[in-house]
Amino acid sequence: MVERQTRRCAYVVALLVVAAWTSPLTGTCHAEDDGIIYTTVQEGDAVRFHIRVPVEELREVLATRPLFDGVRLEPLPHADGEPRWVLVRSDQPIHTGTWRMRVLWLAHQWLVDLRRARALDNDALHDRLRDAAFAERPARRYLDNYLTEVQRRGGDEWIERLHQLSGKLRGSATDPTPTAARRPSYDRALEVDTVIARMTSRPDPIRVVVSQAGRATYPDQPRVEVRLVNDCDRPVLLLSKGWNRMRDGSVFVDVRRSDGSVVLARSVHPSEGSLRGGPRWLQVGESDLRTLRVRSYVEHLTPGEYQVRVLYSNSGGIDYPYSQIGGIAFASEWVDLTVDRRVIHTVRAQQLQLETLVESLSATALIRVVRGEYGPWARRIIAPESAAGQLLSAGWNAVPAIVAFASREDVDPVRRARALSLLESITGVERSPSIALYGAHDVYEESSRRKRPRPPAWTVKTPALGIEVDEQLSLARAWSDIVETMVFEWE
C-alpha cells in the first residue's frame, strides 16, 4: 500500500513538472537581468524579485497605467555593486503586501511574456497563436500576448494567417445559444478581427462612444453614458452577461487629471458596469447603452477638471487592477469631465441655529437612518419637529455644523453616531461598516419604504453596541476635508 501511494505521488509530481515545462510560453527569452526590485517590508527585512526586462519598460507601465498614481521606480543606493531599484510613492517605499506591488509583478510578467513571444519564429508563433485561440483557461490568456506580437511584426503573410484563423473561430461562434457561449472560441474572432483592422489601418470593429459625461457637485461623483457600436461587417457575440450588477469585467473607466496624470484605479471589483442575461448578439450597426458610475472604477474625484475615456474588452478582465496589464481592448475618445465645488447659500443666524440643534441630539433613542429624500414618508420615521428632523430639512446647509460636532473627540459616541447617520441621510453617501459607525440602528429606504431588520441582540438599552470610535473619527475627518472644499455664499 505504501509503495503504491509513493508511486502515485511520484506520478503526480512528474505530471506537474511536465505541465510546467510545456506551458504555452516556453520560448527562449534572451533579455538579460537589469537588476532587482528591492522594497522594504520592515526594518531589517526585504523582498526582491529579478527584473528580466529593461527597467525603462517597467517605468513606462508605471507612467501610463491608471493602476499607479504617482508610483515611481527609483535607483536604490547600495554597496555591493548589484543594480537595485525601489518602488516608491510620495517618496516612501511601497511594501510588498500592497496590491500595487502585486500588480507591478504581473506587469513585469506580461512584459516577460511579450519578450518570449518576440523570441519565437513565425511558424512557432503561429502554432502558439492557434492553440491559444481554441484553448480553455488559463492558456487562453496568452491569446492577446500573441496577437500583440503579431501586430508588431505586421506584413501580408500574417494578415492572411489571421484571416484564416478568424474564419475558423467564426465557425464555432455563430450559435447564440448558452451552450455555444461556453465554447472555448466564444467569439474570440472579434479580437483577431481587431488586430487585422489595426494592421490594415482600418477602424476597430467595435466603437466605444461616450455620449454623455456627467457633471457632478462634490462629493457626488459623476456618471458617464457609453454606447458600444458594432461597426463590424457581421453580428458580434458579446461576452457580456447583462448590463447591471453581475460583473464580467468587460469595462473600465480611465480618468486623467488636467495635468495629464492618471487617477488611481480602485483595488476592488466595481459594483456595476457589466451585463446580465446571457450571451447577446449585437447586430451590424446596432448600439447598446450603459450608464457607469465613475467612482466604481477609480478613486474619489475631488473638485477639478478631468478627462475620461471608457475601455471595453470582449474577453473581459479589465475592470480589476490585476487584469489591466496588456490585452486587446477598445477605447473611446477622451471626453471632458468636471467635478464642481459645492456652493452653500446660508446666513450666519441659520448656522448658529443649526449648531444648537446638533448639540441637542439625543444619546439614548435608537438611531434611525433614512436613505432617500426627506419627504412625507421619512417624516413618519423621524419627526420634522425633532432636532434630527430639522437638521434633515435644512439639507446640505446643516452639513458644516454636523461635521464640526462629529469631529470633536469629547462627544459621546452615540451622539456622534446620530450626527454621522444624518450626514448619510442628507448627502446620500452611504458608508460601511455601518455597525462600527452607528452601533444599534435601523435603516429605512425610500425605494422600499420598509425597515431593514436589525439583529435580535440590538436593543434600545444598548445603543452603543458595536460602535468603534476610531472609525467614527476617521469618517468625521474625511468629511472635514470635504467641508473645506465648499464655497459659502453668505446672504
Image (cartoon, rainbow, N blue to C red):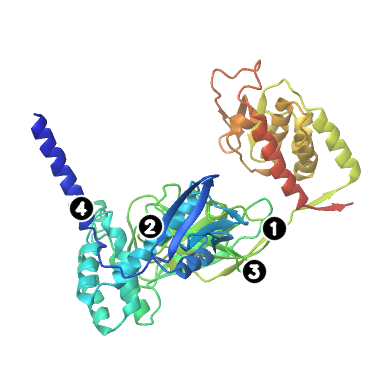
**In this view, the mark in front (1 or 4):** 4
The numbered mark, 3 or 1, whose residue comes first in the sequence reads 3
**In this view, the mark in front (2 or 3):** 3
Left/right placement of residue 393 relative to residue 40 reads right
Separation of residues labelled 2 and 3 (CA atoms): 30 Å
Please indicate, yes or no, whether residue 288 appears anywhere in the rendered image: no
- Position of 413 relative to 354 (above/below): above
Residue 141 position in % (x across, y down): 31, 59
Q: Residues within 10 Å of mark 4 (few under 14, many from 20)?
A: few
The numbered mark, 2 or 3, whose residue comes first in the sequence reads 3
Asked if labels 4 and 1 touch by Cβ distance under 8 angstroms, the answer is no
Left/right placement of residue 308 relative to residue 107 reads right
Which label number is shown at residue 259?
Answer: 3
Nearer the observer, 76 or 149:
76
* Local secondary structure at mark 4: helix
Label 4 is placed on what type of residue? Ala
* Local secondary structure at mark 3: loop
Q: Which residue is mark 4?
A: 19
The numbered mark, 1 or 2, whose residue comes first in the sequence reads 1
Which label number is shown at residue 303?
Answer: 1
Question: Farthest residue in the bottom direction?
Answer: 156
- Position of 93 relative to 200 (above/below): above
